[in-house]
Amino acid sequence: MTVELRRVISQPPVTGEEGDPVYVIVEGISITTFFVEDSIAAAAAATLNTIVTQAFVAGTFEKLVLIQASATNYSKYLLKVNGIIVSTKRSGPDYNIDFDFTGAPFELTIGDTVTIEEIHASGTLDAEATIFGYS
């Protein structure tokens, strides 16, 4: 699976009136070069459960584009970078959520760790998450 983004191309630059550059937007260029997915089974209620963790190392990904998560019941998801909550979402009736940074990719530096955690109110559930990015 890939994430489709827009990318501006200007090689060689095309000029318009008065020498101003004209940018061409090419739709549908896939620039996702990295993804990692993981899952948990029979996760306990009222406890933060880590679904996936990935550390950024040189040559893998430095721009976080999209995270997809789902579970078999309603859940609250936390996106953490280096242990700090960056974003929180709750799943709706379809139990799926996206943390979508396609418009402005989340920049990482070497050593940063991205973690997706889940918490739910009752029973046990299965959950999965996928991190998409590029360098």
Image (spheres, rainbow, N blue to C red):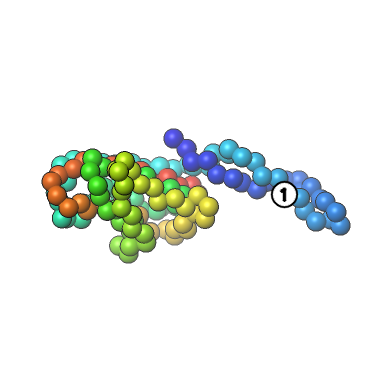
Give the residue drawn at x 66%, y 45%: 25
Q: Position of residue 135 (x, y in %)?
A: 50, 49
Give the residue drawn at x 30%, y 56%: 78
- Residue type at the position of mark 1: Tyr
Please tell me which residue lies in front, 78 or 134.
Answer: 78
Task: From the viewer's perspective, tell me whether residue 20 is left or right of residue 100.
Answer: right
Residue that extends furthest to the bottom in the rendered view of this protein: 84
Q: Position of residue 9 (x, y in %)?
A: 68, 46
Q: Position of residue 45 (x, y in %)?
A: 15, 51
Q: Is residue 102 visible?
A: yes
Please tell me which residue lies in front, 91 or 65.
Answer: 91
Give the residue drawn at x 20%, y 51%: 120
Residue that extends furthest to the front in the rendered view of this protein: 93
According to the image, label 1 marks what residue? 23
Quarter containing the N terminus: top left
Q: Is residue 69 visible?
A: no
Task: From the viewer's perspective, tell me whether residue 117 is left or right of residue 132.
Answer: left
